[in-house]
Image (cartoon, grey):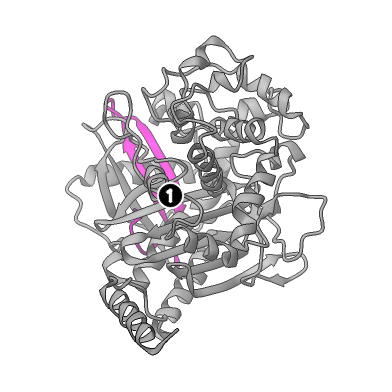
Amino acid sequence: MDTRHAVLLFAVLAFCLAASPSVQTHSPLTGAQIASIDSFVTTEMARAHVPGVALGIYSRGSILMAKGYGLANVELGVPVKPQTIFQSGSVGKQFVSAAILMLVEEGRISLDDSIAKYFPGAPASWKAIRIKNLLSHTSGLAEYESPDRTGPYGPFYLRLDFTENQLLHKIEALPIENPPGAKWNYRNTNYVLLGFLIHRLTGMFYADYLAKRIFTPLGMKSTRLISDADIIPNRAAGYQWEDDVLKNQAWVSPTFNSTADGALYFNVLDLAKWDAALYTTQLLKQSSLDAMWTIYKLNNGKPNDGDYGFGWEITAQNGHRIIEHGGAWQGFTCQISRYPDESLTVVVLTNSDSARPDYMAPVIAGLIDAALLPQKLTAIADARPRLAASLESLLDVMAAGADIHRFVSPEFARIITPGVTARVARRLAPLWPGGTLALVQRMPSPDNTSLTVSQFRLAKGAGSILIWYGLDAHGKVDTLFLEPDQEYRSQ
């Protein structure tokens, strides 16, 4: 290259670089931010009885923080570290969604295809269900993973193994709850079928296809299908909090640890690579990414009330857009929350079914960026003191071990069993009688906007819990829910 051409080339490069818009990224976390995050995470772990947490904070895939808290294995005393592997739960759905859109881009499938095209033995009612209905949870198919269906006498008993075809035939026997596209109902059934669909289109088991097209190209070396049999370094154990005692996760058969509705392993290091890729078109065209992150519209032209796209929820926090999803399975819970306009992502992985990563992630984001911080959950004036008085009377009855059926609605009475009553009594014992009630939130009831549901903080000494409380139109209790206390409002 002669000197004139070299000078011209460097001049063009300099112009292009100067003309390119700068990309917003976050500065490294300060010591104060790290200290506030550490304090919040450890406090929340103690409140919710969580053995271990892995936290990943990224700016466009660049790791700002990758840290473990607590124990990955309680019995062996193994600490959580950034390499620790957790189960994905439904966060795994976003990888399946991406794989389907890859096949769409290749022309091997259309979002408007009837699923009956790929499942020719399916009932006639499936002809109206489109691929996009499965992706967006608007298919109208029933949930296979309901307690009655996955218990010992159900068709999907979690401790039995089934072939893919056997599982498909059982799903084909499920009822249709509503016409496709008429309603949004989150149903794991949809993504199990998408996994079968990938297999039929590619000849590869869906998890192998994910590995080939997503995990391997991105260098996600620890992300893979769940396996109880394989030796997997850095694997965390899952735990359940039952009757105030920590228990090991319940065992399920290999079948139900391999379905496409959320049966993966990953860690916060791998998810940083996934986050980075989602800011580019390395895996998918921008039009496909936009489709994943657009709230799907129902047949009536309105966005679905689940704020759901394809494998992601699209919500907001203090007016800032969030692309997110949670997951829960076998004693693990997790959350990935992406704030694309802030170039910020927070991932919370836990090994406890009692953890609240969906609460933790937005608070952690707010401790990094003050504009995102949720409002504090503090006492507010109560314009309806009779509600608090009625709750106090109910607490007196429960503390005395008396029957509460006469105070509650018929619907609520159906879920009151001796076991439930005993658990509630144990949680109330340290706080009532003698505790104080303070109103912290009141909002319209989700079931009847003419009524309200209230959240009270019950405190005594150093102990406290939150109680959701509501009455029906006849003055009977139809909402009574206890949960660990928290410092900030949930989004």
Magenta stretch: includes residue 478: yes
| Left or right of 134, for residue 32 | left
Nearer to the camera, 491 or 420: 491
Q: Position of residue 373 (x, y in %)?
A: 31, 66
Q: Position of residue 333 (x, y in %)?
A: 56, 53
Q: Give the range drawn in magenta.
A: 462-491
Q: What residue type is labelled 1?
A: Lys
Nearer to the camera, 130 or 438: 130
Residue 485 visible in this rendered orientation of the protein: no
The local secondary structure at tag 1 comes to loop
Q: How crowded is mark 1: few (under 14 residues within 10 Å), some or many (20 or more)?
A: few
Is 109 above or below relative to 178? below
Q: Which residue lies furthest to the front in this view?
A: 2
Magenta stretch: includes residue 239: no
Q: In which quarter of the image is residue 76?
A: bottom right
Point 36% across, 80% down: residue = 9
Q: In which quarter of the image is the N terminus?
A: bottom left
Point 50% across, 75% down: residue = 65
Q: Where is residue 30 in the image (x, y as percent from the top left)?
A: 40, 84
Q: Name the residue beneath numbered marker 1.
A: 285
Q: Position of residue 258 (x, y in %)?
A: 70, 41
Nearer to the camera, 471 or 64: 64
Q: Residue furthest top?
A: 124
